[in-house]
Image: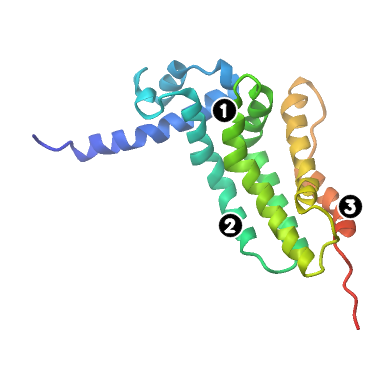
Amino acid sequence: MPSPSPRWRRQKETRPADIVRAALDVFSEKGFAGARMEEIAARAGVSKGAPYLYFPTKEDLFAAVVRDVVQPNIDPMLQMAAAHNGALEPLFRAITEHLGHTVETTPLGRVVKLVISESQTFPEIARIWHDNVLDKALGTVAALIERAQQRGEVRPGDPRNHALTIVSPLLVGVIFQETFVPVGAKPFDLSALIKQHLDTVLPGLLLEKTTQ
């Protein structure tokens, strides 16, 4: 039996990626409940049954969106942060600036809104988001803070609470942008919001170094 032509193999290999990209668009526009596999297939330019060959359920497809689209925008930053042993302030500013830029230039905010608004009906999407994005991000920042506390750089307190304090304005900003701006609210400049928050919070979080 002759092997498939290289062109056919390339088309087959790109199908899952095409389906995932189409799913991101449809999830962002219609939400999880409103998204239909048939529409995703049409956007991807494949047959109606093709998505099921790679993703048996819509939850599996959402997990692929998180793995293939969201995580590549976040994981490199988290890996850099996990290996960081220097001062926290410049790292926090770099991390939050990157997150703000990612939210403003990708559909990440719409996915966050989807998870929040539909997790009660579809708890699996909340679990996917928590395990692959939220828990990893909070865990990385909390570990950084704990190491800084051991160096005497950060005041005492639960590192996870401190971590949530650092990132929470971005989460609130995303929810505001995705929920209220579409109905006429004045948008926030997320990068400016994050910078102002850090300017306010970091002096209270970081301990001043004393000189002998």
Q: Assess whether mark 1 and mark 2 are in contact (beta carbons under 8 angstroms).
A: no
C-alpha span from label 2 to label 1: 26 Å
The location of residue 46, given as percent across then percent down, is 35, 23
As helix, strand or loop, the secondary structure at mark 1 comes to helix
Residue displayed at 82% across by 29% down? 186
Q: Nearer the viewer, mark 2 or mark 1?
A: 1
The location of residue 137, given as percent across then percent down, is 65, 48
Of callouts 2 and 1, the N-terminal one: 2
Residue topped by disc 3: 200
C-alpha span from label 1 to label 3: 36 Å
The location of residue 11, given as percent across then percent down, is 30, 34
Q: Is residue 37 above or below residue 91?
A: above
Q: Is residue 160 above or below residue 113?
A: below
Residue topped by disc 2: 79
Residue displayed at 73% across by 35% down? 174
Residue displayed at 42% across by 19% down? 42
C-alpha span from label 2 to label 3: 26 Å
Task: Name the side, left or right, on which 106 lies relative to 196.
Answer: left
Of callouts 2 and 3, the N-terminal one: 2
- Please identify the residue farthest to the bottom as the structure is shown: 212
Q: Amino acid under label 2? A: Gln
Q: Nearer the viewer, mark 1 or mark 3?
A: 1
Task: Name the side, left or right, on which 139 lies relative to 183.
Answer: left
Q: Name the image quarter holding residue 120.
A: top right
Figure quadrant of the N terminus: top left
